[in-house]
Amino acid sequence: MAPTKVLAGARVVLPTGTVDDGRVIVEGTRIAGGGSPGPEPAGGPGEAPAGAETVDLSGHWVVPGFVDLHNHGGGGASFAGGTAEDVLKGVRTHRAHGTTTVVASAVTGDLDFLARHAGMLAELAQQGDIAGIHFEGPFISPCRKGAHDEELLRDPDPAEVRKLLDAAHGQARMMTLATELPGGLDSVRLLTEHGVIAAVGHTDATYEQTLQAIDAGARVATHLFNAMPPLGHRSPGPITALLEDERVTVELINDGTHLHPAALQLAFHHAGAARVAFITDAMDAAGFGDGRYMLGPLEVEVADGVARLVEGGSIAGSTLTLDRAFKRAVTVDKLPVEDVVRAISANPARLLGLDDRIGSLEPGKDADLVVLDAAFDLVGVMRQGEWVVHPQLG
């Protein structure tokens, strides 16, 4: 049995706020206590036993492990078309950047291939390596296809949606749809009935059509602002509908490429911190480097950290990792640390129905956490009580 670990002296971000000179007590795979280091009754909750291993994190932050709802790969490996070992390589890459929970996102492909690939991903989800599967495509609009192969796009037939859900063996967590297409609303209802998040994205829907999708059960906006009509004063489009409805959580890619800082501020102002989820939308190059890659069947060129299709030049996912998204949100966008923690941990955990286990630093939850220095650079990652990145403190 590993000794109890006490992470002491840090600024610890709890659901109730930030505790200065706080601590987190880890026993085995779980958080046993934490918060203020003040005196506690003997044997009381949060009391560290004799012989505990203490790590002095003075001058650092401790925040919950990051949760990524939308991720296509990293470390040179693809979640969308790679082998099981490729997926695990990508998972390890993102864990080293603080993402202790990741959903593997597929991209548009042949339906039979997607079903076979979902079966492999489902096995990894059952093993606990990933938190489930996100299908982004093929049921999206050719008008807003982004980095998806137009020849493989199709209308969202509920029977075909059901085929993918069955192939995922209960591990499907989310599906992105252009809900204005024929069969879109019925597919949203089917997903909702099966406990799978219906996400509006890669869509050319009007404001009114988007409201219909939300009323039918859609609850997430896939990378808000991207791959959808822009805001218009006479035609407000899906962005307005998704921002104004309190039932919807909006994904944001905070890499400085996908969104202007003012657009991010607009989303936070209208949706509030409780309805934002930071995602990476990462592809193979995340945590790896520039070069040529494949995203599904399409070739991508990554230059200076920006991924674009070789043919046409559309942005093709990102090379973002969530530690970079966190730092940018605090240092560039000037968001409160507590709001960023909600967007990068608590909110996605809630959407996945896993907030009883992850997403916040509370007793009984998995010991998934990230240690950041005073400049908000990552120096440590713990997952289920084990250091993935051990803080090297001098």
Image (cartoon, rainbow, N blue to C red):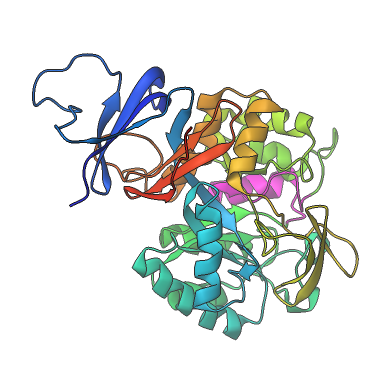
At x 24%, y 40%, the residue is: 364
Q: Nearer the viewer, residue 30 or 158?
A: 30
At x 42%, y 71%, the residue is: 124
- Which range of residues does the magenta coloring cover? 203-228
Of all residues, the one furthest to the left in this rendering is: 42
In the image, is residue 283 part of the stretch drawn in magenta?
A: no
Determine whether 38 is above or below 327 in the image.
Answer: above
Tell me where residue 24 appears, x and y as whole percent.
31, 31
Of all residues, the one furthest to the top in this rendering is: 39
At x 78%, y 61%, the residue is: 290
Kindly indicate the quadrant of the structure image that contains residue 82: bottom right
Tell me where residue 269 appears, x and y as whole percent.
65, 25
Q: Residue 189: in sight, yes or no?
A: no
Q: Nearer the viewer, residue 315 or 115?
A: 315
In the image, is residue 212 part of the stretch drawn in magenta?
A: yes
Determine whether 82 is above or below 229 in the image.
Answer: below
Q: In the rendered picture of this protein, how many numbered marks are placed on residues?
A: 0
Determine whether 18 is above or below 287 in the image.
Answer: above
